[in-house]
Amino acid sequence: MATATLLTYVILRNNSTTNWLLDLVIFNGIALLAVLSLSLSPIPDDQLSRFGVGSAIALWTLGSVASSIDSFFAIPISINIDFIAETFYALFYPVALFGLLRALRSKIVSRSLEFLDTLIIALGCTTILAAFLIRPAMTGINGSTFQVFLSILYPVGDIVLFVAVFTLAILQGLTTRTTYLLIGVGIYSLSDFYFLYISQSGGYEFGSLTDIGWLIGFILIAEGFWHSSNEKQGTRTFNPTVATIALLGSSAILAISVLQPSYFPRFIIAPAFATIALSFLRMGVAINDARNMSNEQILARTGEYRDWETDRKSVV
């Protein structure tokens, strides 16, 4: 249904001018149809992976709706619709990363640890790359500091998302599902890079056909959930090296900010601090899981001993 609606949109867009029905309703409706297609997949799968990817596409759609409303209707000055749209677009990355990682590797040891690992890696790595690229970018990109930050955040988020999916797809093996997810994320990332490029050069036009690259990416990602992962049985393992780098990098950002308060913009400090806080929270969850596992082993051994003692007495 999403594919048919997309073809209809392309035909109508090619034969008409920009209007709110096409670019606000139908365009964003295609993304929601992709979410619906994903949720209706008959393949038994991890529900959190579907929820994560579906929520990510829905967040992106909310950002697109906000941008479309800002383009077609007069919004009161007191409502910063652009900030709302950019916030939804930015939230797409960590939520999509969480859902896609689960879709690619559905066996877990601890759901809490997995969620925290995903947040630490996504938030930490993205913040590090954005922080150390923002200063040279400020000399070459026009706009406010916040606009410069977003100009860095989006391509960094695209890179982190694509590299994570590509790495897991190669490690897991190129099945039908991993191929769809990889191509879908790749098309989305390329569309994002192209949009940023033409926007920076001043050549972007709202409602242009180049915008359908995002929708094609979403449709392919949704299609991936209609195919079995064919995953080998096993347990999920996260590479602690990446999380450690995210923690150390965020700590370095805070240290530099203390020594040179004007070196990084203030909005860089919050995600760096959040990464460190999440790392300590993860440590507490891991310790609690280890304690519970030890208690279970003690109880299991105690039960085995009691069974052995009962059998011994019955023999005697």
Image (cartoon, rainbow, N blue to C red):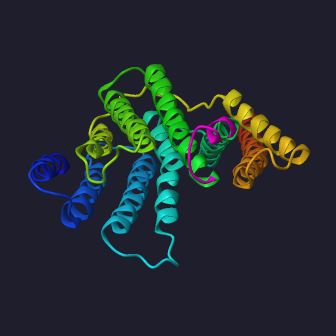
Instruction: Measuring from the top left, give residue 166's x and y in whole percent.
Output: 45, 26
Residue at 56% x, 32% y is 236
Give coordinates of residue 20: x percent, y percent: 23, 66
Q: Quadrant of residue 125?
A: top right
| Residue 221 in the figure: left or right of residue 2 | right
Q: Position of residue 57 (x, y in %)?
A: 38, 52
Q: Residue at x 45, y 79 (%)?
A: 76
Q: Is residue 251 left or right of residue 113?
A: right
The single residue placed furthest to the right in the displayed view is: 259
Q: Nearer the viewer, residue 183 or 195?
A: 195
Q: Is residue 171 left or right of residue 23?
A: right
- Any magenta on residue 139? yes
On screen, residue 167 versus residue 66, left or right, reads: right
Q: Main secondary structure of the magenta part?
A: loop
Q: Which of the 4 image quadrants contains residue 316?
A: top right
Please indicate, yes or no, whether residue 12 appears anywhere in the rendered image.
yes
- How many numbered dots are placed on residues in this image? 0
Nearer-the-camera pick, 166 or 154: 154
Residue 194, relative to residue 64: is it above or below?
above
The span picked out in magenta is 135-144
Say which residue appears at 74% left-offset and 33% top-offset.
244
Give whichever of 136, 36 is nearer the camera. 136
**Measuring 34% from the left and 65% from the top, which residue is drawn there?**
71
36 magenta-colored: no
- From where the camera sits, is residue 315 visible? no
| 77 or 122: nearer the viewer | 77
Q: Quadrant of residue 184?
A: top left
Q: Tell me where residue 66 appears, x and y as whole percent.
A: 39, 65
